[in-house]
Each structure stands twice: as C-alpha cells, then as structure tokens.
Amino acid sequence: MRFRSVFRVSQIKASSSRFRRLYSQLWPQSGRSPFGIAFDIDGVLIRGGDPVGGSPLALRRLYGDDGILKVPYIFLTNGGGVPESKRASELSSLLGVQISPLQVVQGHAPFRDLVCRFENELVVAVGKGEPVEVMLEYGFKKVLSIDEYASFFKDIDPLSHYKSWSVKQTHEMKSTVKESYSSYNVHLDAVKGTFIVSDPVDWGRDIQVLCDILSCGGVPGRHQPALYFASDDLEYQTAFLSERLGMGAFRIALESIFNSVNNNPLQYTSFGKPNPVVFKNAEVVLTQVASNLCGDKVSLGCSNVNQFSTIYMIGDNPMVDIQGAAKAGRPWFSILTRTGVFKGKQNHENFPADSVSSNSAL
C-alpha cells in the first residue's frame, strides 16, 4: 500500500498541498497542531509483521526535517500482548521513526484502571506474547499466566499428550513469588480476576481451564471471578489472504460453552474499539503527546484538555475503527482504508466512514 492508502491527505483536506501547509505553516504559528491522528496498526500500517506499502513514508511526513515530531499521532489498536514500551520499540524499528510508549494505546490499556481493585489479588492472564509482563507493568502483583496456572493441576488438559508443541514460558517468576504460588496455595486461593490480554493460543485448553476457573474461581462454592477482555474483534487482518478469527470469536466460543455447562450465564466486560470510552481516552493521550511537543505539562487524568479541531481515525475495520469514531462523535473524523479487513468498492453500508481511501499511488 502506498502512502495515500494509509493516509489519503487529499480526502482529509482538499488537497495534499493543503495538508502540507497545515503542519508546515500553521504549526509554527500556533505552536500546537490543530489536528491529531490515531492509526490502527494491523491492516493499516502493518500486515503480517511487515510494513504495508509506503506506511513508513507516511509516518515520516509527520516529522520535520530535523526528525522532530510535528503532528501528534498515536497508535490506537485492539491488539496487544506485550508492554507498551516493547511495542513502541518494535514499531520504531519496523517503521523507521522514533515512537514513544505514550503513543501506543493497546486494547488492554484499560486494565490499568483495575489495579486498585486487583493489585494484591490472584489473577490469571491469558493470551499470546507476554501477558504476565503486561499485567506486572501495570501494577498487578499476583499474576499467573494460564500456562502457569494449568501446570499446577495434573491432567487438567486431557489432550495435552496429543500436542506436539511445548509451552515457552517467557516469564520467570521470582523465587519468593514461586513459593507463594505452590500447588497448595493455588488450590486454596480463589482466582479473583481473569484477564484476556491478547488472542489465546491454545483455544481448546484455554476454554477448558477458563471454564474451571470461572465456575468458582478454583474454589467450589464461590461466585464467578471477574472476567475482562481487552477487545472484542470478531476478525482481523494478517498476512493471510482472508481475515482471521480474533478475540471476539474466542469470547463467543467461551461464552457458548460456559453457558452450556453452567446454570448461570457468563459475566464479562469487553474493552477496546468501538467502545467510545477508548476514543475519549485516546483524545487525552493525543493531547499529552501534543503537550510534550510544546513543552507543556498536561496530566493524563485531565479530561477537558482536548484542543484539536479534528482527530483522524485511520482504520481498516468498519465495525471497530469506523463505528467507534462515529460513536465518539466530534472531533473524530473516520478514514476507512481498503488495505485490511475492508475491501469494498464503495463505503461500508452499515458503518460508513467520513472518507474512504483506495490503495492508489501518491
């Protein structure tokens, strides 16, 4: 995909030259960009671990000749599985620009707000990547991956001996923590929260173990522990030709099975786009990014600091990116690309974007 398919400036402001004037002339005069940008990642800037067409060039246009960021932007993604600091480093290397952890807003970012409730409680983190590291960086203190939790129970996965792969433990628990998580304690301590941080890897094993945990928290007679999903995407775009099933599909599978084997329906909370709260939080983060450029000090907790006339949401998923921007309302302006989930010739029928970008050359 060339630059215009990622960020079709002619559709954002009457022409690309007008857009250039927007940050080459207005920015120095006002000291603050009048607009901000929120990029989705998978299917927009990256596909299958590689940059999509001219996406590195697109991002470099947001920097001055001196390499200093001129137009505030963030990555607003339902993906995740690694700490924001690591993701920022990976994106910087892949896209050829310097990206700060502040600019990376992943699906599990709202989990930070739950630390005060679960900080010292036993919680289980599920998903690809480094879910335990994510939770520890947020401030949770008693975290087990679902791999670690399952390892305390012999024969919990009846199909394990049919599996040719082995689980790679990316998190080494400190000796003092290991002692507190002896099989004796895990059997007695109720799991108080379960967090689906990123897409689960072993659906069969994970659904089985989660049904055990969510039935009673690991302790018979107790209520279902809290369950949180970082996002609810049904599908997302990878290097494969057609879309792949996402966390939303896993949630449907887990909920259907849980409700079939339990008397009480599964209770859960889903975050991520298209939740308007995610977009409001993104406004605050964008304001912080802009303030850092100007040397201002703005607290992330401040909700009335948005000074953008427009925030462009650039995404490939109508149900997630475009619907979310529409729900959030002004100052959000949605741009739908044809480089990922969406491939239609016209605008999406149910969730139309403010603008649709083709993959034509610049």
Image (cartoon, helix red, strand yellow):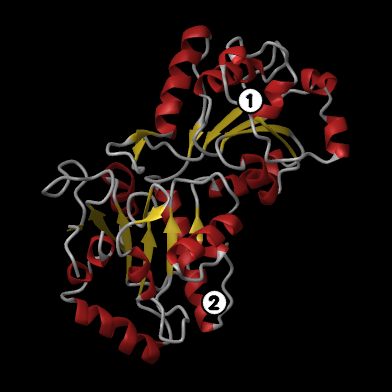
Q: Residues within 10 Å of mark 2 (few under 14, many from 20)?
A: few
Q: Find numbered disc 2 in the image and state the secondary structure of the residue it sits on.
A: helix
Instruction: Give the amino acid at mark 1.
Output: Pro
Please identify the quadrant where the N terminus is shown. bottom left
Secondary element at tag 1 = loop
Query: Which labelled disc corresponds to residue 180?
Result: none
Q: Residue at x 32, y 39 (%)?
A: 240
Residue type (three-letter) at the residue carrying disc 2: Asn
Which residue lies most toward the bottom here? 29
Q: From this viewpoint, is residue 303 visible?
A: no
Q: Along the polypeptide, which appears first: circle 1 or circle 2?
A: 1
Q: In this view, does 148 lie to the left or right of 195?
A: right
**Viewed as shown, does residue 261 lie left or right of 117?**
left
User: Residue 52: horizontal and vertical position, in percent?
Assistant: 33, 57
> What is the tally of numbered marks visible in this picture?
2
- Left of 188 or right of it: where is 81? left
- Outermost residue to the front: 164
Snapshot quadrant of residue 361? bottom left
Q: Position of residue 102 (x, y in %)?
A: 55, 64
Tell me the number on the disc at residue 292: 2
In terms of depth relative to the viewer, which is nearer, 219 or 306?
Answer: 219
Front one among 284 and 102:
102
Image position of 16 with respect to 162: above or below: below
Looking at the image, is 184 positioned above or below residue 226? above
CA distance for labels 1 and 2: 40 Å
Picture quadrant where residue 96 is located: bottom left
Q: Which residue is drawn at 46% across and 86% down?
A: 66
Label ID, residue 225: 1
Nearest the eye: 273 or 82: 82
Residue 360 seen by the camera: yes
